[in-house]
Amino acid sequence: MKSLLQELKTYPQLLFVGVILSFEHLITLFFWLTERPVQWVLSPSNPSVCWPLFSACADFKPSSVVLGIILAVYGLIALAAMYFWIRKNFRWGIIFLWLLVAIKCLIILQDYRLSGNYHYLPTLITVCFLLIPGRAYALTFSFFVIYFTAGVLKLNPTWVNAEAINERLLPPIVNKIGVWYVLVLELAFIFFLFSKKNRWFYFIFAQLVLFHLYSWHLTRFFYPTVMLTLLGILLVVRSTAPALGFKETFKRVFSSAEAKLLTTFFILLQIPQYLIPGDAALTGEGRMYAMIMYDGRTQCQPYLTLWKKNKEKEEMPLQPPWLITRTKCDAMVYWRLAQNICSWTKKDTSIVQVDLYVPVRYENTDEWQPLVAATDVCNKELTYSSFFPNTWINKVTREVSHHGDGSMNPEED
């Protein structure tokens, strides 16, 4: 806190960064009350999808009344934080901003379905603001890292072939040109954030604004609204200190241990998805705590097979609501749901075995592949690792067999 207080005294314009980051929590609250109703996701009647690091989340699920109070307090703290920043009461502004981060993370920790890049990125920016000295340069560099990493993550056939964009407004050729332009924007033009000439800085800034405005009809309102709000930080820090260029900015930012530690931690979280065999967009393995941009759109038809003592069987579809694109076919989600169902099937003496099947495919393919084909899941000690391969998840890829090897019809046994 000491270094941040000192910088705020030297560069009082940075108070607007605190205002922006506090306001982002009000946008989040609106999102949780409308588009992704957190009170429904965390309803006691709704089975929990717990994070691996918090398997007992259901035991701590708040009641509807308590959750309503938490959300009200969350909103009031966001308003109070904005007030303290505007009134230049920096110490309380910092304390309240930390409180907002803590409350938001604790709410998201209650259910995996509440995760998303739109929470990941503002939290990352906030932590950089609170911890890394030299905010005028550290914040600019944090935006560079986010967009450059997003560009690297898009270096895959799904993005390059424009398969990840479900765009129907424009002709296919325009979509292909667009996805390639985004790669150029995030891997090359993004260096203009460090340009000493304002015209190049405002060129890239305008491109980022247009990019997020265009994405509005693809991702709905929340994600682009959050990113457009955060982009205001670049204007604040640009007016705070003169641009130094990429090399000089890099040296200044990474002269601090905080920057080295946070950047290393961020990079390490992105790596497991590349080390685990299989297509991470299909398997979901290794990227639970990574930044995810556009994936290839996947389809799945998960179900449980309940085997009875009389040798009859019953198929139970698993279709939990409120799954975002990155989690709707995540094997971990259906493993959690299977665990929930096992809690009552074990009490039913007529059921002798429960099997879990998750056929999966990309939208533009005809073949199904068995992402999960696990038998007797209620009696096996299946576990889930966020950073290492899971033996019960098949390492499926885009190369779909056309000879029956590994393909699966979800209608068949």
Image (cartoon, helix red, strand yellow):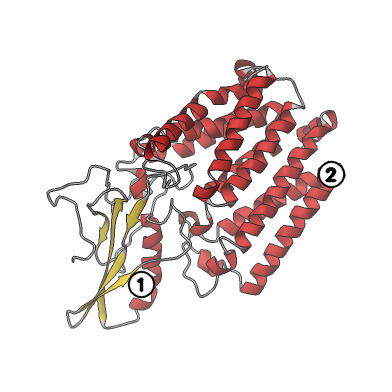
Q: Position of residue 326 (x, y in %)?
A: 43, 50
- Of the residues shown, which amino acid type is indicated by label 1? Cys
Relative to 80, 168 lies left or right: left
**Mark 2 surroundings: few (<14), some (14-19) or many (≥20) residues within 10 A:** some
Viewer-side residue, 70 vs 53 = 70
Residue at (23, 42) in percent of width and height? 399
Q: Quadrant of the N terminus?
A: top right
Marker disc for residue 86: 2
Q: Secondary structure at mark 1?
A: helix
Q: Amino acid at mark 2?
A: Ile
Report helix, strand or loop for mark 2.
helix
Q: Is residue 71 visible?
A: yes
**Residue at position x 83%, y 47% in the image:** 84
The residue shown at (54%, 33%) is 147
Q: Is residue 5 left or right of residue 184?
A: right
Q: Is residue 216 above or below residue 305?
A: above
Q: CA distance from mark 1 to mark 2?
A: 53 Å
- Placement of 340 over or under 87, stated as above or below: below
Q: Residues within 10 Å of mark 1 (few under 14, many from 20)?
A: some
Q: Position of residue 209 (x, y in %)?
A: 61, 36
Q: Are marks 1 and 2 in contact (CB under 8 Å)?
A: no
Relative to 243, 188 lies left or right: left
Vertical order, 42 against 118 (above or below) = below
**Which one is earlier in the sequence, the residue at label 1 or at label 2?**
2
Q: Is residue 134 visible?
A: no
The mark found on residue 227 in the picture is: none
Residue at which label 1 appears: 342
What's the residue at 18%, 51% (across, down)? 406
In front of the other: 287 or 25? 25
Quadrant showing the C terminus = bottom left
